[in-house]
Amino acid sequence: HSAVIETTAYLMVTEALGDAAAHAHAHEAWLHADDRGGTLIVEVRDDGIGGAVATPGGGLMCIADRAGALGGAFTLESRPGGTTVRIEIPTA
């Protein structure tokens, strides 16, 4: 993977884990990364209180913007009981 893709994945993971620790009051978090046929998929889930949003200027929006600039996708699902942050970035 290129350094830009690796950096984007690293930033997404650190942002999601940081949010889980600082804001979500999560007890556990899970990380899954996979390269599926030319697409890097990185997902971080936690068991926190939910309520995360990608706001302009915030860390999650920065990750969404970076993924989009690389032709990828960003999804955020946050509800009581947990948050899932996911990026998919083409690697080929």
Image (cartoon, helix red, strand yellow):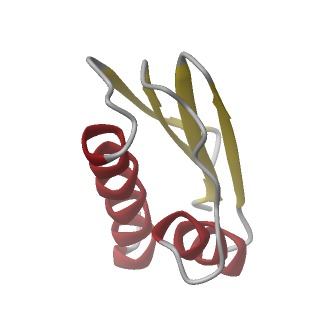
Position of the C terminus, as image quadrant, is: bottom right
Instruction: Give the quadrant of residue 63.
Output: bottom right
Task: Determine the residue positioned at 25% across, 40% down.
Answer: 21
Task: Determine the residue positioned at 36% across, 57% down.
Answer: 15
Q: Nearer the viewer, residue 47 or 49?
A: 49
Image: 43 above or below 75: above
Q: Nearer the viewer, residue 92 or 22?
A: 22
44 with respect to 30 (left or right): right
Task: Determine the residue positioned at 64% across, 70% down.
Answer: 55
Image: 32 above or below 7: above
Q: Position of residue 36 (x, y in %)?
A: 60, 35
Q: Nearer the viewer, residue 84 or 1?
A: 84
76 with respect to 1 (left or right): right
Q: Does residue 41 show up? A: yes
Q: Nearer the viewer, residue 37 or 45?
A: 45
70 with respect to 85 (left or right): right
Q: Position of residue 68 (x, y in %)?
A: 71, 72
Q: Does residue 39 show up? A: no
Q: Position of residue 47 (x, y in %)?
A: 43, 18
Position of the N terminus, as image quadrant, is: bottom left
Image: 30 above or below 56: above
Task: Determine the residue positioned at 39% across, 36% down.
Answer: 24
